[in-house]
Image (cartoon, rainbow, N blue to C red):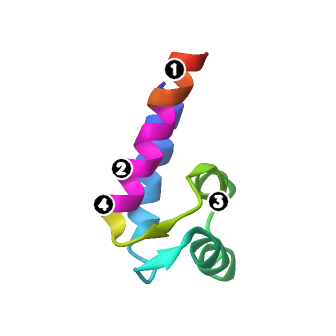
Amino acid sequence: MPGRNRDITRLGAYAEMIDFPCTKQEMLQMAEEQDFPDDVLNLLEDVPNRLYTCESDLIEAAAGLGKTRVEVG
């Protein structure tokens, strides 16, 4: 999924602006306050609702979404 991979790459750039550790809800609030682009916000909305400890933790969760969607789709 080339589009999803590009979104994950963009997420990596914006993840630097998130204060970890944080929950999904806290992360979405920070992202909205900092005017993240819609594609990044959409990806954040799709990640599991849990505590994220660092940028790589978030990126791994987002990357896992693509794998799940490919298997189901």
Residues rendered magenta in the picture: 56-66
Is 52 above or below relative to 2? below
Q: CA distance from mark 3 to mark 4?
A: 17 Å
- Quick check: marks 2 and 4 in contact, CB under 8 Å? yes
Q: CA distance from mark 1 to mark 3?
A: 21 Å
| Residue mark closest to the camera, 2 vs 3 | 2
| Residue mark closest to the camera, 1 vs 3 | 1
Q: In the rendered view, does 50 fall on the left or right side of 31? A: left
Residue 63 in magenta stretch: yes
**What residue is shown with label 2?**
60
Q: How many marks?
A: 4
Residue 51 in magenta stretch: no
Label 2, secondary structure: give it: helix
Is 24 above or below relative to 71? below
Q: Residues within 10 Å of mark 4 (few under 14, many from 20)?
A: few
- Quick check: marks 3 and 4 in contact, CB under 8 Å? no
Instruction: Residue 56: give its label.
Output: 4
**What residue is shown with label 3?**
41
Residue 12 % position (x, y) = 39, 59
Residue 56 % position (x, y) = 30, 60
Q: CA distance from mark 4 to mark 1?
A: 21 Å
**What residue is shown with label 1?**
70
Residue under the image location 56 percent in, 52 percent down: 47
| Residue 44 quadrant | bottom right
Amino acid under disc 4: Ser
Q: CA distance from mark 1 to mark 2?
A: 16 Å
Label 3, secondary structure: give it: helix
Residue 2 % position (x, y) = 46, 27
Q: In the rendered view, does 70 fall on the left or right side of 61? A: right
Amino acid under disc 1: Val
Q: Residues within 10 Å of mark 3 (few under 14, many from 20)?
A: some
